[in-house]
Image (spheres, rainbow, N blue to C red):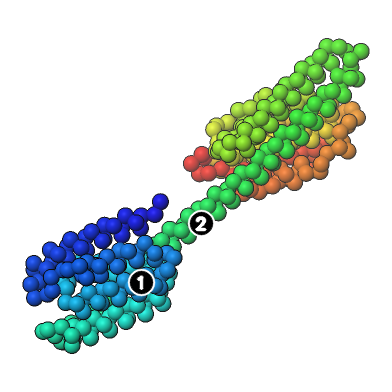
Amino acid sequence: MRKTPYLALVVAVFQVIASQGAYYGQTDREKVDATAIVLLLVGPAMMLFRHRFPKTSLALTLAATCLYLWGGYPYGPVFVSPIIMLFQTVTEGRRKLALIASALTTVFFLIYSTWLVDPPSRGLWHILAIVAVMTLILAAGELARYRIESRAERARVAEEESRRQASEERLTMAQELHDVLAHNISLIHVQASTALHLMDDDPGQARSALTTIKGASKEVLGELRSVLNVLREGAPRSPTAGLDRLGDLVERSGLDVSLEQVGARPLPAQVERAAYRIAQESLTNAARHAPGSRVSVRLEYLAAELVITVTDTGSSMPAVLAEEGSGNGIPGMRERASALGGTLVAGPKETGFQVEARLPLPEETG
């Protein structure tokens, strides 16, 4: 709801009542009569139409003010509506209109006060006072317009930043979801192949593989539900993976994994998440390309960086998923490390393969 009708009503009441009161202090002026009241109401009435007819409403307001003064009625309250109209004209960006209107009004005031009023007001200071008042009104309007535009610009920038952050968050979630799906589906595939191969010869081992499949499928469903809830609700998302879950990851990998953490301590969430995903992707690659290998996972918490080293001894059985990967595993890990200002090197190591990532740590965590 616009405030203009209420402002116009307040200005109308003030101009009519205050002008009648002003008469008692200006007994040399004409008493406020019906004509004066009509002229006093023109400005507030035009305030209601200034959005649709800006030029006409401003011209009629200033014309009514000039006629009021020419009629010899009391000074003072009559200037409220033209001041407001000029101010609002400038704040709405109609500078040229406001400048022309204020210039013409200034000329009338100078002519009126110099030749049409008795006694006339002559002198440089009188002229400067009239010009200064008009300039002050225009300057105040410009200042208000600048503040309004600045506020709108800040709101626009904030909205764009919010959209950018939301887009980046969705990209992060997509990458997280890719890593979770790639790891768990690869794990399910490997364990399912193992279960089928050992179903008749070693039912116990087959049962263990099926148990791993159950756990992996439960986790991937949980991750999917979490991401879908975030997308549905638009709520901030807390990291779903940290180094506190590294032990569970190793247990479900289906590989012979040794885990070593040297100098373990809490780290920033983004570092923990990246380290977890790098270890997860490395184990996924080992399960895909080097099934049956022994894998060592070592995390060394140094003062200025976290070093993650994942080494496997090479495949000891056919790699059932060797040709089914997306080819984005190592580039994705390297991208995660680079996003934090770190590095990642991956390549053959003796008979196996090694991934080494170095993630810098903030000073306060050192």
Q: Which mark is residue 151?
A: none
Residue 239 pos. (x, y %): 59, 35
Q: Residues within 10 Å of mark 2 (few under 14, many from 20)?
A: few
SS class, disc 2: helix
Point 8% across, 68% down: residue: 25
Front-lying residue, 118 or 39: 39
**For this rendering, which residue is in front, 283 or 127?**
127
Query: Residue 213 at what x, y percent from top left?
Result: 78, 22
Residue at x-position 66% and y-position 30%? 225
Question: Residue 17 lies in what quarter of the image?
Answer: bottom left
The residue that label 2 is drawn on is: 156
Q: Amino acid at mark 1?
A: Leu
Tell me if residue 350 can be seen.
no
State the image coordinates of residue 289 (x, y, percent, origin top left).
Answer: 84, 34
- The relative height of residue 116 versus residue 185 in the rendered view (above or below) is below
* Residue 142 placement, left or right of 155: left
Residue at the image point whose x is 39% and y is 54% from the top = 2
**Quadrant assignment, res 11:** bottom left
Q: Which residue is mark 1?
A: 58
Name the one closer to the observer, 94 or 69.
69
Residue shown at 69% from the left, 41% from the top? 175
Q: Which label's residue is closer to the chain start, 1 or 2? A: 1
The answer for how far apart the CA atoms under marks 1 and 2 are is 31 Å
User: CB atoms at circles 1 and 2 under 8 Å apart?
Assistant: no
| In this picture, residue 347 sits left or right of residue 138 | right
